[in-house]
Amino acid sequence: MGKYTNREFIKYLREKVNPKTPKVFKKSEEDFTIVVPEEVNYIKSYRGKVTFYLTDGTTQTTIESIAEVKEKFNDCPEFISGDENSLINSKYLRNSTYASGEYQLKLRMSDLEYVRVTPYNAKKFCEALDIVSLRYCQQYRRMMLTCQRFNIRLFDDDIRQFSKERLLSEFCDSNGNFLMTNLYYNQIWQVYNWIINGELPEDEIFMGNIRSFWYTYLKPVLSVLNKVQEKYYGDMIEAFTKFTVDWKLFNYKEWDFLDVKRYNKKLGKKKRIYLILVAEKEGQLRLLEHIHGKHDITTIALGGEPSVLSLEYFVDDLEEAGINKEKRFHVFFATDYDPVGHNIQKTFLQKLKRHGIKNVAIHDLVTLDRFTPEEIETSKYNLLEEENDSQNWLTRAKKWVYKTGGIGDGNTWRDRAYGMEADAIAPGKMVKLFEEEAKPYLK
């Protein structure tokens, strides 16, 4: 976006000029029209008459030509031509649409429908505002509202250099409660702006993975507050998710974070790209490689619950391959028959949906009917032996048993609290199960 960040773009539009000097135009041979530039949204020439559309909803007209009007507005650089017959006050841009090769802009204090901008003048807009595309009209408004709502600011000083007193002053509510999440938001936003403006310190340019951000930027601040705890790492990931998925203010690729799971996925060819085999464990990679090589489908080994970063990169790869997100996707899961496997499926599907892939058919390859009674008896494992209070494991296990029935015929849920690992299915058998389930879609 050139030298401006989204936030600075707003400031640019609001403060570049503040034209309050009235301008006088002929309304007729005997009368005059007086307009104040900052009160003008839009100027349009139609059938020889030029109309000024004002921010209060009223209009003024002049018999002077649009060329003469543009000449008088030369000292107001916020006014930019939409086409040969119009001027648009860029301070009041609200959002934009793009259709039939042209942008149409909506202005902030105006009852007008969208105003037209030709492709040539769209380039002039971008040059004048130092942005890449008029699509940032929408982004800067969304960013402005988000930053206002969540008190996200752009500090001139490195937050890592703040004293404890200043941290408590900047990130506490009116009752003196420290707002850890607000610290995350502001720290992330500061570093993001450094990155896109090329201001990242030279010795910090190799960011690595997302944990590098934790060690380089957040941990030093938490040390000042004496709050270095691993639980805050998960909260930081949630803060990144807000920016990337919920608010859509940036994506992980802009940070150039390393996708540590990048070798765990392969894309299918042609229509088989829409068939996705998902394995829970990286130990199943050779199985996935075999099925991908044989059937040209998409495969991915998650290595646990999928991260937002890995899923963003995965969907980006699919998009670059030319997928149509509206088409039907068939997702085949080779995940454990237990609470963790159930949650991995749920999380994967939720994150696909948040990235625009919503038309999904689910095929579960690891279900009890895939095992013989003897296999179940020898391979099942007791969920309660893995009880972990910090993760509410007991509650998760109970909910899963009630949802699925668990394993066994006991009278209580504890009697049925057993699971089966996907690895209990031999690789050769898993290939056959997939081929049987996917047969209608491999044609």
Image (tube, helix red, strand yellow):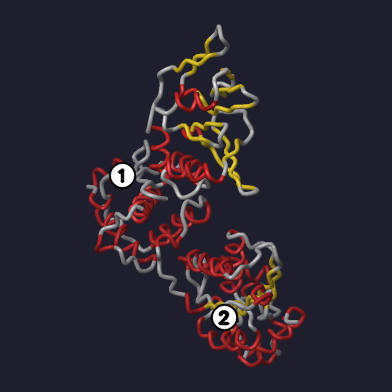
Q: Quadrant of residue 395?
A: bottom right
How would you rate the neighbour count of disc 2 (Cα within 10 Å): few for under 14, some for 14-19, many for 20 or more?
some
- Front-most of residues 249 and 398: 249
Q: Residue at x 34, y 44 (%)?
A: 154
Comparing labels 2 and 1, the label whose residue is closer to the camera:
1
Determine whether, in the image, residue 74 is placed left or right of residue 350: left
Q: Quadrant of the C terminus?
A: bottom right
Q: Residue at x 69, y 73 (%)?
A: 330
x, y percent for residue 398: 61, 68
Determine whether, in the image, residue 212 is placed left or right of residue 385: left
- Front-most of residues 378 and 99: 99
x, y percent for residue 381: 57, 83
Quick one: SS at disc 1? loop
Q: Quadrant of residue 207?
A: bottom left
Q: Residue at x 34, y 42 (%)?
A: 172
128 w.r.t. 192: above or below: above
Q: Quadrant of residue 66?
A: top right
Residue furthest top in the image: 30
- Front-most of residues 316 and 388: 316
One can see residue 3 in this view: yes
Determine whether, in the image, residue 374 is placed left or right of residue 167: right
x, y percent for residue 312: 52, 64
How would you rate the neighbour count of disc 1 (Cα within 10 Å): few for under 14, some for 14-19, many for 20 or more?
few
Give the tally of numbered discs. Answer: 2
Amino acid type of disc 2?
Answer: Asn
What residue did someone put label 1 on?
155
Q: Which mark is residue 382?
A: 2
Quick one: SS at disc 2? strand
x, y percent for residue 274: 66, 73
280 w.r.t. 148: above or below: below
